[in-house]
Image (cartoon, rainbow, N blue to C red):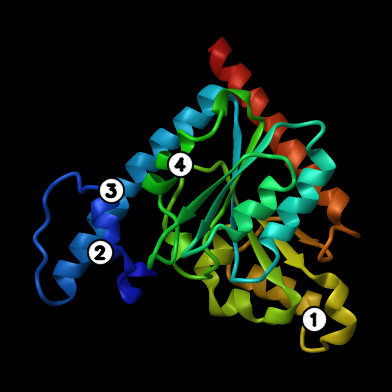
Amino acid sequence: MCRECGCALGPSIARAPLAAPVAVRHGPVGSLELVTAILGENDRIAAANRARFDAHGLLVLNLMSSPGAGKTSLLEATIRRLGGELAIAVIEGDLATENDAERIRACGVPAVQITTGNACHLDAAMVRDALGQLPLADLDVLFVENVGNLVCPASFDLGAHRNVTLLSVPEGDDKPAKYPVMFRGADLALITKADLLPHIEEFDPQRARRALREVGYAGPVLELTRRGGPGFDAWIEWLSGERAALRVAARGEAGA
């Protein structure tokens, strides 16, 4: 995570001021205290984000994967399917460019691009700052497409209701074993680009599922092609179920 790569020890301090000053000392103890404080402040902001989403009855999903696993293509296909039924918006995270946000806007829905510069993940403060550019009260579903990375995004709660992690066939079926924290913390795992399976013998879906179980992931696993195809209906059904559950929870809290 970021205590190894160091990305939390610079820009994150300016984005999310620490709840209390922490002296940076040389050696592992000082670094650990600093990272712990940063993550604690991030969690506080994430909780406020989630409360804000709940107040609007807005389902928020955090999409995570390595670069090129198909997050943006999945969003495009989802918008094409549900854009006439649900009000959807997207927050895009990348180190640079607005390429993905432009693709989403071309589908006819609002998209806010966060360019992190040198940070390899989104954090809760970045998401909070982006929310002012979106009509939250008018939305049904908000997708956050995190920076492509199988390490650091797993450590930063954004306030989303569910984490969705993609594993694409070209990456290999051993990625859950190599990056267990990312997959263990997911609520849904998607095997993407499944149409390439006949051409990539190194990827075995059963091995991938076994690897997911072995790292502690217990949720559903869906297989999708690059443009939807088989398995896409199950993804839409899962989305609908999560939105229905959020509405039920909101009614229960209102009646309490």
- Per the image, the residue denoted by label 1 is 204
Query: Under tag 3, what secondary structure?
Result: loop
Q: Residue at x 14, y 68 (%)?
A: 30
What residue is pinned by disc 2? 10
Determine whether, in the image, residue 59 is placed left or right of residue 157.
Answer: right
Residue at mark 3: 16
Image coordinates for residue 234, horizontal then vertical, percent? 84, 50
Identify the secondary structure beneath mark 4.
helix
Q: How far apart are the alpha carbons under marks 2 and 4? A: 20 Å
SS assignment at label 2: loop
The residue at which mark 4 appears reads as 130
Q: Residue furthest bottom?
A: 202
Image quadrant in which you'd find residue 230: bottom right
Q: CA distance from mark 2 to mark 1?
A: 40 Å
The amino acid type, in three-letter code, at marker 4 is Ala
Q: Amino acid at mark 1?
A: Asp
Q: CA distance from mark 4 to mark 1?
A: 39 Å
The amino acid on which the numbered mark 2 sits, given as a three-letter code, is Gly
